[in-house]
Image: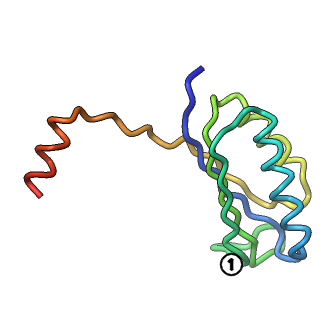
Amino acid sequence: MIMSHYEMMVILRPDLSEDQVNQEVSKYQDFLSQQGCQEITVKVWGKRRLAYTIDRFVDGIYVLFNYQGDGKQVAPLERAMRLSEEVIRFLTIKLPTPKPQDEATAEAVAVEA
């Protein structure tokens, strides 16, 4: 099983309380854990102005999820977010995996710098 790094930006409704935001975050974090994801990190950026109005909202609560998984969890997670009334937008991207460098190349770069 090949593990890749994923990043998901989620925008929640701005009228949610802090408890409701924490409940949504823990719900999706638990979902990722149940799907076998590893290295799950969550950053709540808080309420920010949207670039354009979405469903009458001009602000949104931004949450960033970073995790490592095999890719099978992306579709069920996005489906759950699509059905949720608290989520107004989401975007998942697969991050490129860094290519391992051999030690000689790493040392040559270090000497040049």
Percent of width and height locating residue 20:
91, 68
The image quarter containing residue 10 is bottom right
In the picture, the quarter occupied by the C terminus is: bottom left
Q: Residue at x 86, y 51 (%)?
A: 27
Going by the picture, which residue comes out furthest to the top?
A: 1
Which sits in the foreground, 110 or 76?
Answer: 110
Seen from this angle, which residue lies furthest left?
112
Residue at 38% x, 39% y: name it: 98
Residue 86 on image: x %, y %: 88, 61
Near-viewer residue (37 or 76): 37
Which quadrant does the N terminus fall into? top right
Q: Is residue 46 left or right of residue 82?
A: left
Residue 58: name its quadrant.
Answer: bottom right
Q: Is residue 5 above or below residue 22?
A: above
Residue 70, x across and y down, in percent: 63, 29
Can you identify the residue that label 1 sits on?
48
Q: Secondary structure at mark 1?
A: strand
Q: Find residue 101 and report its image quarter.
A: top left
Which is more toward the observer, 71 or 29? 29
Against 48, is 73 above or below? Answer: above
Q: Report the amino acid beneath label 1.
A: Arg
Q: Position of residue 64 (x, y in %)?
A: 65, 59
For residue 85, side relative to residue 68 (left or right)? right
